[in-house]
Image: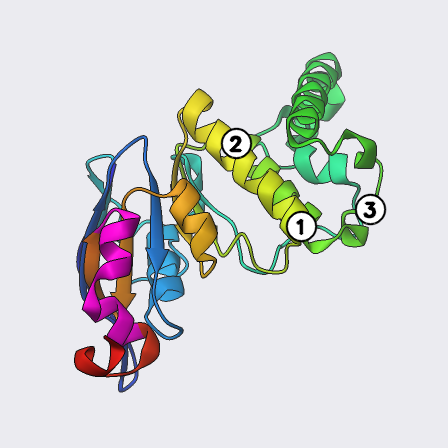
Amino acid sequence: MLEVDSLVMDFGGFRAVDRCSLKVEEGTITGLIGPNGAGKTTLFNIIAGALFPTSGHVRYRGEDITGLASDRRFHKGLVRTFQIPHEFHRLTVLENLMMVPPQQAGESLFANWFQWRRVKGVEAQTERRAHETLRFLELSHLAQERAGNLSGGQKKLLELGRTMMTDAKLVLLDEPAAGVNRTLLRKLEEKIATLHRERGYTFILIEHDMEMIEKLCDPVICMAEGRVLVEGDFAHVRSDPRVLEAYLGETTGEAA
């Protein structure tokens, strides 16, 4: 589904991503781990279209999207979330979901004046879908709450819900466990697993919570110094001496 080929990202004299290559198969939950500064978020930004690489290619479903703008990638079903949620804090939880679907009839001034019945119909359909999403996320009781008042974990669930309001095929999750209490984290894990298992979502997630990675992800890719260090199932990656060295900053012998 996704192929990253020899990506390089330079910021002046600093190389954040260094000839990085990896593949993500459709129908998987791929974990992306590595120490701080490994280049994970920069790689996410390139895949999502927030950054254009110095060199290399990104291919999505067989198409080279390296130079494609982020909104074009969004319309193709490539969606990302953020470590710090980007909710519209003054809008309600329901409104945050309803505004996500692209190209809604109500966005047209002409349609609002001369096709208002169609606009009302589309809006009602979008609202029904939003309520279904809230029920799935177990957030229906917060539908009319301002999104800015939610807890960290509830905001992460809302971000996941916003991806569900699109025609997402590949979802990039940037540290979904960050700032989430353990109870809501278990719920978040459950919802990700259900979307993957029952609705066919493909996920890539950056995460430092190894318990979450172990539960959800196969394969797991470890990055260090802008490159892929090792890839495999969780047990294989966890036991690799190079991973210990990257995380602990020690030589392989010392880490052992």
| Residue 18 seen in this snapshot | no
Question: Observer-nearest residue: 133 or 175?
Answer: 175
Nearest the viewer among 106 and 158 is: 158
Q: Which residue in the structure is indicated by mark 3?
A: 146
Q: Foreground: 115 or 240? A: 240
Of residues 195 and 217, the one drawn nearer to the viewer in this rendering: 217
Alpha-carbon span between mark 3 and mark 2: 21 Å
Secondary structure beneath dot 1 equals helix
Q: Does the magenta stretch include residue 107?
A: no
In the drawing, what numbered circle is on residue 166? 2
Relative vertical location of residue 96 with respect to residue 90 in this rendering, above or below: above
* Magenta region includes residue 238: yes
Res 145 quadrant in image: top right
Amino acid under disc 2: Thr
Q: Residue at x 54, y 35 (%)?
A: 190
Task: State the quadrant of the C terminus.
Answer: bottom left
Residue lying at 70% horizontally and 14% vertically, measured from the top left: 121
Q: Position of residue 122 (x, y in %)?
A: 66, 18
Res 132 quadrant in image:
top right
Mark 3 vs mark 1, CA separation in Å: 15 Å
Mark closer to the chain start, 1 or 2: 1
Crowd rating for badge 1 (residues with CA inside 10 Å; few <14, some 14–19, many 20+): many
Residue 222 point in image, percent of width and height: 28, 60
Looking at the rendered structure, the kind of residue marked 1 is: Gly
* Numbered tag placed on residue 153 in the rendering: 1
Of the numbered discs in the image, which one, if any, rests on residue 114?
Answer: none
From the image, which quarter does the N terminus lie in? top left
**Which corner quadrant of the image does residue 208 belong to?**
bottom left
Asked if labels 2 and 1 touch by Cβ distance under 8 angstroms, the answer is no
